[in-house]
Image (cartoon, coloured by chain):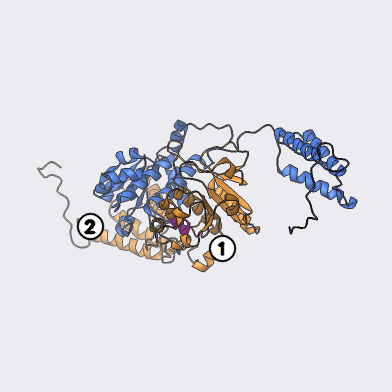
Chain colours: A orange, B blue
Amino acid sequence: MAGTDRTKADLAASLGAGPAIILVEPQLAENVGSVARAMANFALAELRVVRGRAQADGEKARVFAAGAHHVIDAARHFERVEDALADLTLVFATTARERGQAKPVDAPAEAAARMVAEHAAGGRVGIMFGRERTGLENDEISLSQRVVTFPVNPAYASLNLAQAVLLVGYEHFKAATGGAAPFEMPTRARPGTHAELVALFAHLEGELEDGGFFRSPDKRASMVRNIRNMIHRMEPTIQDLRTLHGIVAALVEGRPGPEGRGRTVLKPVKDAGDPV
Amino acid sequence: MAGTDRTKADLAASLGAGPAIILVEPQLAENVGSVARAMANFALAELRVVRGRAQADGEKARVFAAGAHHVIDAARHFERVEDALADLTLVFATTARERGQAKPVDAPAEAAARMVAEHAAGGRVGIMFGRERTGLENDEISLSQRVVTFPVNPAYASLNLAQAVLLVGYEHFKAATGGAAPFEMPTRARPGTHAELVALFAHLEGELEDGGFFRSPDKRASMVRNIRNMIHRMEPTIQDLRTLHGIVAALVEGRPGPEGRGRTVLKPVKDAGDPV
């Protein structure tokens, strides 16, 4: 809503605990850094890394985190996937392909709705992402309750690790906050009243009459309706209506010919010898 | 749906022409490359670059495009934003902040729905992204019909260029294809019939009776109901029911004591001298 002023504190409260992001054996430090950045973009704070301390702790990860050092600094490290998941009540595993496991599959938006509901019910959620090249192993997937996969172009399905985290964070943020754009059209002047609109119609239609716009009397009524509807679709404020009155007046002022009311504007030369 | 086999050709047809991605003065070649990759992930093919040939044409962009060279190769280059937009019927401008323009603002999902509708109505859509540091200029924004902005963490709102394109591509792909996950839980054996379920209940409850599980007769009925409901929630297939029968039998086989029906399993030593 135009009047909403959602402060950062409000937002943190409404987000609650987002899902823990669990990276299993990440291979490239730049990906861990980009994951941290994507998490910060969508207010996720909890990074857990299984057998990836070297990738997550170095300078390279920090460079790619681009300021989201707080996520890197707070990361927790584990040797076993089971330990990384121990306190969670709902665990998702991300996979790019069907992996033959009898486990329900969610698109990211469905998974995000489940995450928010689980948190509201007092649970604690995490989502596992596997190795860049090979993903999660089947035994790791079997530790999760549900699978998340991404609707992507099957002809080019190589979503990278940070992009996958970004989409999960984005959908969670939308689900947790309602997904409205963070700002709206700026509050403008108040809308024009019906009487103010009609005054513009009268001004414009009168000048159009004088200017010979309605050459065909039987079409006049429908032409007037069309013009009025165009102006309605503009949803003009009182300021817009003033601007439109000014535009009509300025155009009339410059009108050439015997009924011109001000300075004369030269007609374009239509019979010049030069080709047009 | 489990039986759906959406081929690549079907997908391309259903996507139709996705929005043209218009980059205005991109500053870093790696970003142009990553944009191309994000576009390919979500089946967007049309990249237009305004005053950024050096950034889009070089080797670095290709490296970051990670195989999406077809997008880079097909990119069209323009000197003026107006020319890059000339054939479009609906143009969105992306901005990170409110820019004081009296223009409707969409979140990405709303914008994606409008893009799909515009295409269905015979229109042609594009979305402009500005410079990495400074975004679009106000005059450039004024050439668009609508503004798109991203719901992000206000405390860390620096979404990078390729991530912004990724989110637009993702939402467009969802809107154009219905957004279902690309696969579902694998088709399993057929669900168990009611009679097959009741047979399992009888097997399990009989063995539990023999094993002395129902110590408190007045709680028996509610315990049975709880166990049956747990099994119902599992939605077992006929194969799952066979597995459960086998589990019950195996546990009973190993049951110790006088009523044990097979090999005797040693009870854990509870009175050993070592602390537990």
**Chain of the residue that carries numbered disc 1 in the rendered image:** A
Q: Looking at the image, which residue is at 74% across and 42% down?
A: B232
Q: Is residue B189 above or below residue B48?
A: above
List the single residue furthest toward the left: A273
Circle 2 is placed at which residue position?
A255
**Chain of the residue that carries numbered disc 2 in the rendered image:** A
Q: Looking at the image, which residue is at 80% across and 55% down?
A: B271
Residue B12 visible to the viewer: yes
Q: Residues within 10 Å of mark 2 (few under 14, many from 20)?
A: some
Q: Which amino acid type is shown beneath numbered disc 1?
A: Ser
Asked if residue B54 lies left or right of residue B244, the reply is left
Residue B152 visible to the viewer: no
Foreground tag (1 vs 2): 1
**Residue B178 rendering spot, x and y as whole percentages:** 52, 41
Number of residue marks? 2
Name the residue nearer the viewer: A50 or A108.
A50
Circle 1 is placed at which residue position?
A14
The residues colored magenta run: A35-45
